[in-house]
Structures are given as structure tokens and as C-alpha cells.
Image: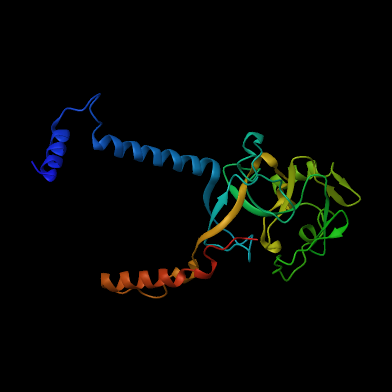
Amino acid sequence: MTEAGTEEAVVATAASSPPDGPAPAPRGFYSLQSLAGTIVIAIFVITFVVQAFQIPSESMEKTLLIGDYLLVDKAHYGQSRAWNWLLPYRPIHRQDIIVFRYPVNPHQHFVKRVVAVPGDRVRLVDKHVYVDGVRQNDAYAVFQATWHDNFRDEFPDGGFYGEPSSRDWFRQARKLIEDGELIVPEDCYFVLGDNRDDSYDSRYWGFVPRENVVGRPLMIYWSMDRDNLAMAGALPSDKLSHLTLNVTQWLNGLRWHRMLRIPQ
């Protein structure tokens, strides 16, 4: 018998001989196992590492726009010492942009910029932020209103807004005001929107507790200008033209220059 014949006989014997030990699991089992592993990893990532959010309002313009879609890094500000060796945890600093659960209604998520951290003495003078008497660099801020709102622009000296949540906030805040400055308590943050004239923020409802902080925006992974998606006039009568128009408007609405941008 030739060497080739011997090799073929060995292969055939190995294939036909009963294997030692238990029979192998069917292929479907391994596919199901792989799918389950993928789901577990995805749940872990969504729960502990990143989460997707959409920007619904103008309060952070021009840093974040309506129609921006964010990936939020939920591990960046983590507090678990057991994981410090693995994940790059760090404290929250002034000028950081954070995503947090709205203190008045924790089911809602807000995104704002931190302007004062625990122990800071904060006030607004002529719309600009002062911390411990020093004016902060707020070149990112946008001022669009043509009128002067005493409450908003001279906080806390300008009084407090009239909504119920603001009245509760006033009762809390007046205990923390000294010499016209608001003292930020431990484990709390004072946040503002970059669009200062159109932001519902700490001036109106108070501090963000540390426990409410979800994370920081990691990147803008998708961005769409919804104004470009509104169709003007009558739609074409035939379905193909209608579909073509929708696809064209959808492509025109994409803001490619904002995608994969890191908000700062």
C-alpha cells in the first residue's frame, strides 16, 4: 500500500471510529452559546461602560446640537475603588460636560457643563461665572437673548424663578448664600448649559448630587439636522419619487463634520 493509501485509511478510520468520551454537542448549541455570550457582553457594556443618548434641546449649543447622538462614558467618573486599577476613574472637574439624572425627575437625563464643584463659592455677574471671586473662562458660552434677565444673569442676587421646583430650591439655597455667593456643598455640583440664555439648569432647580451623575460624553457618533428633513410643499404622487425625496433629504440632513467629534 502506498503512503497516500495509508494516510487515506487512517483518515477514514478516524472518521468512522467511535470517539472516546461523550458525543460532541450539536452545532446549534455552540451558536446559541456564542449568541448568549454576545448578549452578556452587550448588557455589561451598556450597563457599566457606555450608553447612547440623543440631544433633544438647545441648552448646550453650540457645543452640542439638537440631533446629535452621543456615546456616554459611564466608567469615567466611577467611584468603585475595587476597579481603580483597571478603569481610568477621575474626579469631576470644572468645565467637564456631564450627563446626569435630573434631580427633580430622575427618569429624565440632562447634559450640562460643571461650573462649580464642592466647596466653590459661585455667582454670576453680567452673565459671566465667578468662582471664589475669579471670573472663569467661558468662551464656549453662547448668549443670544436681547433682553436682560436679572434672575438669570445676576445669580443668586437677582432672586429666584417662580416655578415650584425653584421655590424649593430657593429655600435650600438661601441657607448656603454668603456675601452674594452660593457655596456648593459636599458631593454636589453646580451646572449650566452652554446656551446660557436658553438653559434650564442649576440656577432654576439646584445642585446635581454626585450619585445622579451618569457619565461624560465620549463622542458624537451620529448627527442629523432635523430642519433639513422637513419636506416643503406637496409630496410627489408616485411612491418612487416619494422614496427618492425622503432618501435625499435624509442624506442632506446628516452633519458629517460632527460625527466622531469629542465634545469639549
Query: Is 193 situated above or below 26?
Result: below
Q: From the image, which quarter does the N terminus lie in?
A: top left
Colour convention: rainbow
What's the residue at 52%, 48% (across, down)? 51
Q: Nearer the viewer, residue 64 or 148?
A: 64
Q: Return the x and y of residue 30 as percentages of the image width and height.
A: 30, 37
Number of marks present in the image shown: 0
**Quick check: can you spot residue 162?**
no
Rendering quarter of residue 218: bottom right
Residue most extreme to the left: 1
Rendering quarter of residue 184: top right
Q: Nearer the viewer, residue 93 or 126?
A: 93
In the displayed structure image, the side of residue 178 where residue 212 appears, left or right: left
**Quick check: can you spot residue 44?**
yes
In the displayed structure image, the side of residue 10 where residue 60 appears, left or right: right
Query: Is 198 situated above or below 251?
Result: above
Q: Return the x and y of residue 262 as percentages of the image width and height.
A: 59, 61
Q: Return the x and y of residue 171 as percentages of the image width and height.
A: 79, 42
Q: Return the x and y of residue 193 as percentages of the image width and height.
A: 68, 58
What's the residue at 70%, 67% (across, down)? 142
Residue most extreme to the top: 21
Rendering quarter of residue 35: top left
What's the residue at 59%, 48% (across, down)? 109
Q: From the image, which quarter does the C terminus lie in?
A: bottom right
Query: Is 76 situated above or below 245?
Result: above
Q: Nearer the viewer, residue 84 or 181?
A: 84
Q: Nearer the viewer, residue 246 or 133?
A: 133
